[in-house]
Image (cartoon, helix red, strand yellow):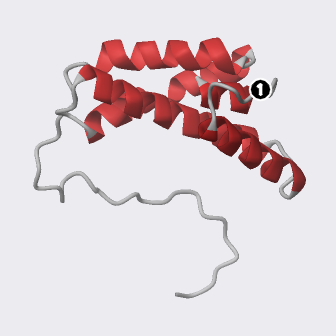
Amino acid sequence: MPCSDSLTTAFVLPDLVSHCSFPLRINQHCYDVARASEKWLLGGANLSPARAAKFMGLKAGELTAACYPDAEPFQLRVCDDFMNYLFNLDDWLDEFDQLTDTRDMANCCIAAMGDPVSFQTDKRAGLMTKS
């Protein structure tokens, strides 16, 4: 490709949907489960109003419902919570020092997964992991 000094003003995204031979479906429990999962995360993550608005725009519950169109409500809720948790965890990690704070958060979350009943912490990531 030739190199150009001009600024790119647009780009074309490929049409990935038309190549899919499977019907696009969404789980029938999408709305109720997605709202419950969002409520869970917002209740525990202590996000600022700006971060909460950004999180709500993500619509991870809708993405999960499209990935698991046949899941029962409980199964879908587990997937929704995990997806919301991971997206939020990723945002938290963006704010930390890459070596020290990231390792500390990983250790906190792993400890919370290893013993969610007895593990004690005041860190949001650990508390969300326990819940």
Q: Quadrant of residue 24?
A: top left
The residue lying at 52 percent from left, 12 percent from top is 39
Residue 129 in the image: state x and y as whole percent.
62, 31
Judged left or right of residue 107, residue 71 is: left
Regarding residue 59, the answer to whether it shows in the image is no
Secondary structure category for the residue under label 1: loop
Judged left or right of residue 34, residue 100 is: right
Count neighbours of disc 1 (C-alpha within 10 A) and say few if under 14, some if 14 to 19, many if 20 or more: some
Image quarter (top left, top right, bottom left or bottom right) of the C terminus = top right
1 to 120, vertically: above or below: below
Residue 97 in the image: state x and y as whole percent.
88, 51
Relative to the observer, which residue lies in front, 91 or 117? Answer: 117
- Residue highlighted by disc 1: 120
The residue lying at 73 percent from left, 38 percent from top is 92
28 to 95, vertically: above or below: above
53 to 100, vertically: above or below: above
